[in-house]
Image (cartoon, coloured by chain):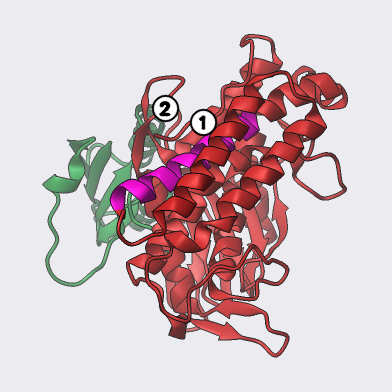
Chain colours: A red, B green
Amino acid sequence: MKKLLNTLYVTSQGSYLSKDGECIVVRFESGEKKRFPVHILDGVVCFGNVLCSPFLLGHCADRGLSVSFLTERGRYLAAVHGPQSGNILLRREQYRKADDLQASAMIARSIIAGKVTNSRTVLKRCIRDYPDRIDQDRVKAAVSILDGCAHRLRSNVTLDEARGLEGLAANTYFGVFDQLILRKDESFFFNGRVRRPPLDNVNCLLSFVYTLLTHDIRSALEASGLDPQAGFLHRDRSGRPGLALDMMEEFRSFMADRLVLSLINRGEVVEKGFMVKESGAVFMNDETRKTVLSAWQKRKSTEVIHPFIKERIPLGLAFHVQAKLMNRYLRGELDGYPPFFWK
Amino acid sequence: MLVLVSYDVSFEDPSGKRRLRRIAKVCESYGQRVQYSVFECVVDPAQWTKFKDLLLKEYDADKDSLRFYFLGKNWQRRVEHHGVGVSYDPENDVLIM
């Protein structure tokens, strides 16, 4: 079984990453430096003004580490990967399935079923844990709509219908998302998803965590030899990692949304940690970003029992397991793609 | 698993410095320096075989000594640190620079 490795996040502005032997050396403007052996890492994520030496990039590519570059605020810019790996026969099969609307619909249905069920679990947990602090009737109504969606996904719906159901489920879920924010003060509220740029604190957090999730899932897909761009639910668009976005759907609610919720509800992020630009765009300061990053890394090391392979794994490995399962499905070893159901 | 590697390199002859440098370099590739000639290395068995082989190629059996301490998989509760020199836990710490 693959081991869950650490990710190196470089947020100090003006730092310089280089290679020394088998190590990544991080130099700071202050002259201080730290070194990490490459084999304990599975990726490097650079925020803003971080330089990498070409030798380091080459070395990482060679060793299968992906190096991603994000803006200081966490918007994805670019990534460096090694040579296209894996099995061309597998990738061809992926393209074939992606071209075939019926086959795509099958996969999309499983993925959306995973998403809907997981969102529903998030809501139900909230009803169970905080029955007095939320508008129970509204959340319960949302749960029953999600139930309905999940039920309809079991029948033979087309890709467009599946997509419609996903939209309905997402609207329902985000419709009651504000209820899940228990700390009622003016600075954290949710009136629907806004992105590019996020216009309030909650959306700012969500966008940032989604970027981290995309980075991890994308690397997992690439590591297993799949093409992260050819999606089934998300159709092709230049530059868009369709399959990574597909697979994200299963993980969004319980990996990202719940992380954001607990950061807010436990008071780990505060209003001071956010800044508003003239354009209305909200972004967070370094400290908040670090809080979110370490919470993310901690979340990834939480152990769960994978519902399909029935093994105890850290959540961060679930991305890799799902990628492998997709792999096996495409190769015809499984009859369907089993999405990740969070309990 | 965690392997603690420590070494003593003799400076009796002029090639001692060279061996010291080369051994240190190999150790740095696999772990973190926790004291001057002490390294903590989190490796899997395959990596360990390679690592050990590299070390044994660099040292001089008649003059130097190498010591390996195997602290196993649950090494976190077997290591205590006091005083200066902050180390990181490569498996659990969040590496944010």
Tell me the tag on residue A306: 2
Q: Secondary structure at mark 2?
A: loop
Looking at the rendered image, the quarter that the N terminus of chain A falls into is top left
The answer to whether marks 1 and 2 mark residues whose Cβ atoms lie closer than 8 Å is yes
Is label 1 on the same chain as label 2?
yes
Q: Secondary structure at mark 1?
A: loop
Q: Which residues are magenta?
A: A110-129
> How far apart are the alpha carbons under marks 1 and 2?
8 Å
Q: On the picture, is A204 further left or further right than A118? A: right
Q: On the picture, is A176 further left or further right than A247? A: left
Label 1: chain? Answer: A
Question: Residue B25, can we see it?
Answer: no
Q: Nearer the viewer, residue A287 or A140?
A: A140
Q: Does the magenta run of residues contain A121? A: yes
> Residue A174 falls in which quadrant of the image?
bottom right
The mark nearer the N terminus, 1 or 2, is 2
Q: Nearer the viewer, residue A48 or B2?
A: A48
Label 2: chain? Answer: A
Q: On the picture, is A255 further left or further right than A83? A: left
Q: Nearer the viewer, residue A276 or B68?
A: A276
> Residue A18 falls in which quadrant of the image?
bottom right
Q: Report the amino acid beneath label 2.
A: His
Q: Report the amino acid beneath label 1.
A: Phe
x and y percentages locating residue A275 in the rendered image: 56, 85
Residue drawn at x 75%, y 24% as measured from the top left: A157
How many C-alpha atoms fall within 10 Å of the one at disc 2: few (<14), some, or many (≥20)? Answer: many
Q: On the picture, is A96 further left or further right than B52? A: right
The residue indicated by pointer 1 is A340
